[in-house]
Amino acid sequence: MPLLSRGDSFPALSLTPPDSPALTLPGAFGGEWGVVLFFRGSWCPYCNAQLRAFQHASATLAEAGIKIAALSVDDAPTTAALIAKHGLTFPVGHSADARAIADLTGAFVNPDPVYLQSTGFVLNPSGQVVVSVYSSGAIGRLVPEDVLGLVRRLHEHATA
């Protein structure tokens, strides 16, 4: 699959949080703006920092009509521990099939051990990609301030 670009429809993607039913993105965003984060795993300090940053900004993002979801190859117990450790209130899926996700979205996969490299998407209320950020290593990822600024600018532009 080629990389997803601005205007592409985000593919239907199942995400299963620990102890919760599966969600399908982008439909689970309910017609609101969405941020989809693929992270390397609970062991990655950069991923932990990104997830904490989105949690810290979650109320401000919600006020702007932006929902968040994240996904990794970690198993359910590891994901549950990560959610508890950082007090994450947005859906975090576990046990992702890295190669299947890569086929759908173009995300880069680390070969051994197998995991998704950091990838982020901002989706409009119609489920189309507004921004895609692909990383081939530890750094290079979406930050909440950029997402908020982008969505605010797009709102302003749409009403002008």
Image (cartoon, rainbow, N blue to C red):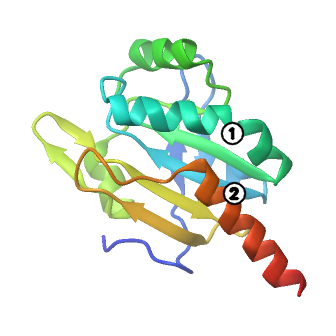
Q: Which mark, residue 132?
A: none
> Going 74% across and 47% down the picture, which residue do you hit?
61
Q: Is residue 153 above or below residue 24?
A: below
Q: Earlier in the sequence, mark 1 or mark 2?
A: 1
Q: Is residue 49 left or right of residue 84?
A: left
In the structure shown, which secondary structural element does the residue marked by tag 2 occupy? helix
Residue under pointer 1: 57
**Amino acid under label 1?**
Ala
Q: Is residue 59 left or right of residue 48?
A: right
Residue occupying the far right of the picture: 159
Front position in the image: 3 or 150: 150
Front position in the image: 26 or 146: 146
Q: Quadrant of residue 112?
A: top left
**Label 1: few (<14), some or many (≥20) within 10 Å?**
some
Quadrant that contains the C terminus? bottom right
Asked if disc 1 and disc 2 are in contact, CB closer than 8 Å, the reply is yes
Q: Is residue 153 left or right of residue 87?
A: right
Residue under pointer 2: 148
Q: Is residue 42 above or below residue 35?
A: above
